[in-house]
Image (cartoon, grey):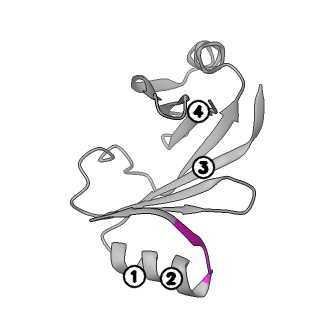
Amino acid sequence: MIKRLSWLGIRTERFSDLATFYREAMELEVDHEEEDFVVFKLPDGSKVEVFGPSDQDHVHFDSGPVAGFEVDDIEAARGRLEAGGAEFIGSIQRWEPTGESWSHFRAPDGNVYELAEKG
């Protein structure tokens, strides 16, 4: 079911410090940047997204970094995880320009994770 780790999201009060660290010390490539939001793209195509304190779309990222797991069929994977005890946060989100889909869930350990399907 899970193909690979494809995404990592971090919400932090120290947005500027972390974005600078990823950009300069880790030499990650910036793919997209806005106020309190930056996307870094890794050579294998996976992404790291950093959200600052003014970001209101990811307030549920309250347990630390959120890892995203890539799947071939997000609907089937979501059903399987729900049956296994995962509590999903909202519906499946879709980004029409790329065909990507994602859905966040809280696992039995209390942490938030993501399922992602590439377009």
Residue under the point 54% across and 25% down: 86
On screen, residue 41 above or below 97: below
Q: Quote the CA–CA distance across marks 4 and 2.
A: 27 Å
Most foreground residue, 89 or 52: 52
Reading the image, the residue beneath label 4 is 115
Q: Amino acid at mark 3?
A: Trp
Instruction: Please give the count of numbered marks on the rendered protein.
Output: 4
> Measured from the top left, where is residue 95 in percent x and y?
45, 32
**Residue 52 appears left or right of 32:** left
> Measured from the top left, where is residue 64 in percent x and y?
46, 57
Label 2's element? helix
Q: Quote the CA–CA distance across marks 2 and 1.
A: 6 Å
Label 4's element? strand
> Measured from the top left, where is residue 83 in percent x and y?
60, 12
Dot 2: few (<14), some (14–19), or many (≥20) neighbours within 10 Å?
A: few
Q: Amino acid at mark 4?
A: Leu
Most foreground residue, 95 or 52: 95
User: Which of the 4 image quadrants contains residue 18?
Assistant: bottom left
Most foreground residue, 94 or 14: 94
Main secondary-structure element of the magenta-colored stretch: loop
Residue under the point 54% across and 34% down: 98
Residue under the point 70% across and 29% down: 71
What residue range appears in magenta?
Answer: 26-30
**Residue 92 appears left or right of 90:** right
Label 3's element? strand
Q: Quadrant of the N terminus?
A: top right
Reading the image, the residue beneath label 1 is 17
**Residue 6 appears left or right of 13:** right
Label drawn at residue 21: 2
Q: Quote the CA–CA distance across marks 2 and 3.
A: 18 Å
In the image, is residue 95 part of the stretch drawn in magenta?
no
